[in-house]
Image (cartoon, coloured by chain):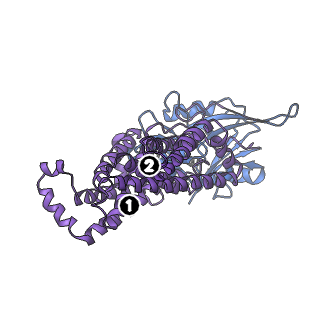
Amino acid sequence: MNEIVSTRTNPMIDPAIHIWGWEIPVYLFLGGLVAGMMMISGYFLFRGRQKEMATSCLTLPLLSVVLLSLGMFALFLDLAHRWYFWRMYMTFQPASPMSWGSWILLLVYPALLANALIRPPAWLTARIPALVTLSERIGTRSATVKFIGIANMLLGAMLGVYTGVLLSAFGARPLWNSSILGLLFLTSGLSSAAAFVHLVARDEFEQKLLAKADNAFLTAEIVIIGMFLIGLLSSTAVHIEAAQLLLSGPFAPVFWVFVIGLGIVIPLIVQSLAVNHKVAHTPVAPILVVLGGLILRFVIVQAGQVSHWTRLFPSH
Amino acid sequence: MARYAMAIDTVRCVGCMDCVAACKTENGVPEGYDRDWITYESTGQFPTLHMEIRSERCNHCDDPPCVGCCPCGASHIHERGGVVLVHHDKCSGCKACIAACPYDARFIHPDGYADKCTFCIHRVEAGKDPACVAVCPTHCMHFGDLEDPHSEVSRILASRNSHALVPAAGTKPQIFYLR
Ligand code: SF4
Ligand code: SF4
C-alpha cells in the first residue's frame, strides 16, 4: 500500500494540475493548422503553381493571418498576468520553447503577408489600389515568389514543430515528454490544412490533389501516434502510466472514438474511396479531419496535465 | 558561493502545521493558497504500516526546469544560495513554470503572477532562518549552506540517512528528509 494525503489545496494545482483550459489546445490547433497552410501554399509557390492552386495560394495566406491572430488571442486570454505579456518580447530565453515560439510567431506574420501580396484578392485591391503595383512587382519575379514559398515552408515547419515542442519539453509531465510530439502536431496540422483545401476548393483538380495529400498525411499521423505510444510504453513506469491514460484510462473513449476513429481512420477510408471514384467527394471526411485535429490537441493537453511523476513511488 | 538547503526530520515531525501557518503570516500568502504544506504518506501492509509526515515546499532544485522554461526571464536563480525565485513584475502568468515543476510546488497568485516558496530569502539575507524553520516546535527543520561542511545542515546530512523527493524526475531537489 502507498497512500498519500496532502494538506495542499492550491487552486488549479490540486488534486491534479489544471492550468490550461480550452485556450491552449485551441492555440496549438490553430498554430498547427496555420503551419500546415503555410507549408502547402509555400510548396505551390515554390513550384510556381500558384495560378492553378487558387485556394491554396489565394485563400490560405490571408485566412492564416486571421486564424493565427485568433490563436494568439486565445493564448493572450490564457495568461494570468495578461498585461505583462510584452515581457516575452523584452528578452530571448534560449532554453524556453515558449520564448522561441513567441519570436517565431513574429517572423511568421511578414512571411504570410508577403505570401498574400503575391495575389491579393479583388476586394482588397479595390480598397487599397496601391497593392496592385506592389503585387505586380513581387508576383512577376519568379525568384522572389520562390523565396517567399521557401520562407513559408520553413517558417510553417518551425511553427508546427514548435506547437509540439512546447509541450514535449516539460519533463515533469510524462505524457508530453516525447520528442515526437512536434512531428505529430506538424503532421496533424498539415492534414487539417489539406482537409480544409479539400473542403473549400472549387477547382476539382486542386480538391482531388489535396484529398490525396491528406490521405498521405493521415497515414503518417497514424504511424507517428503509434511511435509516440510505443515510445512511452517502453519507457519508465511513469511514462507507461501516462500512455495508459489514453489507451485504457479516463481519456481512452475520446482518444479512440474521436481522435483515432472519427478523426483519422474513417475519413482516411472515405477519402481513399473518393479519390478512387468509388464514392463522391463530400464535406464529411474533411470536416471530421479538422475536428479530429482539434480534439487531438484537447486530449493531449488535458491528459498531459493529469500525467505525473510524484504520486507513483513511495518516498521511503 | 553558497548552496542553501533544508534537512527535515520526519521522525520528529508531528504534522502540527505550524510551519504552514508561519509561512502564511510571514509572506502574506493569500487565503486558500499554500507555499508549504504537510504530506502524510503511509506504506506497507497491515499490521506493519509505516507513516512518514513531511513538511513540503519548493525544493529549490539545483537543476530547476521551472527557470529554463520561463519565456520572460521572470523565474530565476537568485545570486545567493541557488534559491529559485520569481520577479513578479516580469511574469506574464503563462504557467509554463507550473507545468515544468514535477512537485507542483508553484501556483498562480490571485494577482496573476507565479508564486511559491522563497526560502524566506528576505529573512535569510538578514541573518535569520526561514519562518517555517524558526517556528517549528519540534525543531525538526534545519536550514543552511551545503557548501559549508560545518553548517548544521551539512553535519546532520552527513550523520543521518535521508532521501529527497522523486530524484528520478531529474531536477536535483535540495530539500532532504531525514529518517
Ligand atoms: S521544486 Fe519545482 S518550483 Fe521549486 S525549483 Fe524545483 S522545479 Fe522549480
Ligand atoms: S508563469 Fe511567469 S514565472 Fe512562470 S514561466 Fe510564465 S512568465 Fe515565467
**Chain assigned purple:** A
**Neighbour class for label 2 at 10 Å: few (<14), some, many (≥20)?**
many
The residue positioned farthest toward the bottom in the image shown = A143
> Between residues A182 and A5, which one lies in front from this camera angle?
A182
Separation (CA) of disc 1 from disc 2: 17 Å
**In this rendering, would A68 be left or right of B7?**
left
**In this rendering, would A297 be left or right of A76?**
right
Tag 1 secondary structure = helix
For the residue marked with disc 2, what is the amino acid?
Ser
Residue A262 can be seen in this image: yes
Residue B87, percent from left and from top: 43, 47
> Between residues B82 and A268, which one lies in front from this camera angle?
A268
Q: Chain of mark 2?
A: A
The N terminus of chain A - image quarter: top right
Tag 2 secondary structure = helix
Residue A148, percent from left and from top: 30, 65
